[in-house]
Image (tube, rainbow, N blue to C red):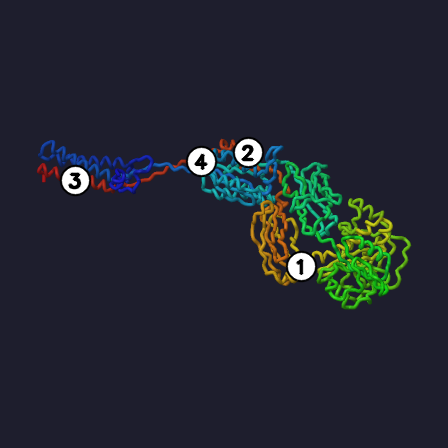
Amino acid sequence: MFHRLMEILLGLDPGFLAREGSWSLRFSPPWPWREIVGSATWNVLLLASAAAGVIWVYRRDARSRASRIVLASLRGLALALLIALLNRPMLTLGQNRVESSVLAVMIDDSLSMMVPDAGSAGEPRGRLEAAVDLLSRDDGAMLRELAKTHEIRLYRFGADAAAVGGFAGGATGGDDAALAAIKALAPTDPGTRLLPSIQSVLDDLQGRRLAGVVVLSDGRPSPAEPVGPELEAIRRYNVRVFPVAMGTEKPPKNIELSSVVAQDDAFAGDIVNVKVGVRFRGYETGQRVVIKLRDKSTGAALLDADGHPAEATATARDAGGAAEVELQFKARAPGPLDVLVEATPLPGELDAGDNSRVARISILDANIAVLYVDGYPRWDYRYIKNEMMRDKSVKISCLLTSADPSFAQEGDRPIRRFPESMDELLDYDVVLFGDVDPRQFTDAQLQMIGDFVAGKGGGFGMVAGPKYSPRAYRNTAIESILPVTIADVPHGAPKSIVEGFRPVVTPEGLAGSIFRFVADPSANREFLLRRWQPLFWHCPGVAAKPGVGEVYAEHPTDIGPDGRKAPILVLGRFGAGRTMFSAIDDSWRWRFYTGEGVFDTYWVQQLRYLARGRKLGQRRVALAASRSGYELGERITVTLRILDPQLSRQLPDRIGVELLLSESAQALSRLELVRQTGQGDLFAVSWSADRVGRFSLRVPAPAPGVEAMDLPITVAAPALELADARMDRELLERLAAQTGGAVVEPADADRLAAMIPSAAKVIPVETTRAIWNAPLALALFALLLTAEWVMRKVYGLL
């Protein structure tokens, strides 16, 4: 109350007298020539003049001495107050403003900070994990110690820098929000731009009392850039940088499954080959790693033909070399199978996430219905027919066109004529023609075969013969189906061959299962090269249709009309179905001389290839990604093809799907499969790969009778960021030397509080208010004049 009264009397702002600080009274007189003669000269002259005037006035007064003294005193006080007010008294409040010291702490969260080389040899930890632990352990004890001297500003950086919180100066406890932000950091940024990020932080804190910058990083920039100009630019800020070196300078160790090659589909009971590429980095020559196959959905180990877990050992040829192993497993129940290929993690690996890949394989129903038509009972006809009748997975109907009408046609499902309608033909998955005269069929029946293959996904194969196939099928509906050109097949009887030949299996043939007669790949190649029985006839003049037929075996010496080796076995596609042309008619020799297993494998696998179109069509839909693995930032495209035309017409133009995190099944986003313009049976969705990990695209059941589907997708770190993930000590030391800082080891990080002195500054601040014109001054002057007037009246001087 008293303070407010005084503020009113002195004409001060409310609360002015309540402020903390030191008070002083100063004068600012407007005397002329003050700079020359000084204010004191004027005050002395004025006081002397006032004193002289008062004495002169009251000395002549006849009143008593006491009265003259009283009146003179009142007059003198009034004049003294007037002279004091003429000196313009000012009330000054002196205070100190403190500009706090600021310390920037930057944390690298780029992908290279996932390298597990920051802990002990026995318990390696990721670099970012170690950095976060360093800052957050004991409730942020290190940061709390630094905050006693500095105001802490926290930043994360990779390709750029961003603020994540801070600690107030003088803090005695951890800031929960800042600690939570630090603990939430993950090594996901695909690039590291160390020096530009530091410049960005320095710009952000420009104008503050910056004591230094602490950088927890491995210092490895990506992409690599010239650092000289950027270091010079940082030096000009005149701020010391203290890098905390995270990681080691040794090349990181890592085992990566670089590739997984497996067929898209297989039949139940088939032996499926999976080729796995393994890349070793940082390991010594001879390092081994075990590769295993598991069913991703159940976690159960996939078994080989002998019932043992499917696994193989890959061996490093050198420190940065690659190896390839082949694993085999026996397909079991029909349905989609996600094969999880895993390399057993080794201690201290750079990224265990690239130790596994998923290959999706459709396991098809192995029961195949085959319609086999031949013109006469040649050797191949007899053995193919007998072998397929013995095979429990094949139901065969044989039609021998040269047989007497009373002849009982052979097979598991005997028939008496070739189908005359599509409904009858759809009882079969595969139609196989031998050396049969095309005049045995009507044009409608031949055209129906084309529709069966192209529109219904059926399979069609032709086994060449010396009489009719394939030459007689020129200019028929069958010619367009075949995967080979037949225009140059010569007329007349085939030439006599005295010396036999062994077909040369192409790389495509070796990769498939048709010529896989021995489980071990090297032993199988040896068998194909030297042990199987030579053949003595092949159909000349054929060539694989470009872009349609794929040659699986070729003649060792004869040349076809296209200048390439004459094809022996050609597989292809026609519309939705698959096709085959065999240029030999004496494969029966393989059964006679090398055993039933070779002949059975050769033909059963061909028939299964031809039946795939029909079997796949029974699934009604096919979900696929452009590939199974992507790098961060790449575009992922997934397609859903509707194989059932009736189902395609029932579906809406957009189908909602979910992108899930595989480990937790957490939904990350909702997307839409959109029907493609001009392709009514095709839906597609694409998005950018914005985080590393394993994901699953879940498609709900699009229609009754169609099950929900999950498509596994893997997103890996870009090779650029992890191509060289060693800690770059040279750059960190140059940065520290250029700025006057020092490189600090993580174990010595507690010394930072002593190494970085405060940059705080105390700045005096004065606040001045004039009181010469205050109400109190006017009141005092008036009071003195009034008192003199009253006393003069009392003494009878008025």
Report, in whole angstroms, how far the alpha carbon at label 3 lies from the one at label 4. Answer: 60 Å
Secondary structure of the residue carrying tag 4 is loop
Count the labels in the image.
Answer: 4
Secondary structure of the residue carrying tag 3 is helix
The x and y percentages for residue 91 are: 29, 38
Q: Looking at the image, is mark 3 or mark 4 nearer the viewer?
A: 4
Residue underneath mark 1: 643
Q: Residues within 10 Å of mark 4 (few under 14, many from 20)?
A: some
Residue underneath mark 2: 744
In the foreground, 610 or 528:
610
Earlier residue among tags 4 and 2: 4
Residue underneath mark 3: 785
Secondary structure of the residue carrying tag 2 is loop
Residue underneath mark 4: 171
Quarter residue 649 falls in = bottom right
User: Residue at the location (88% across, 60% down)?
Assistant: 494
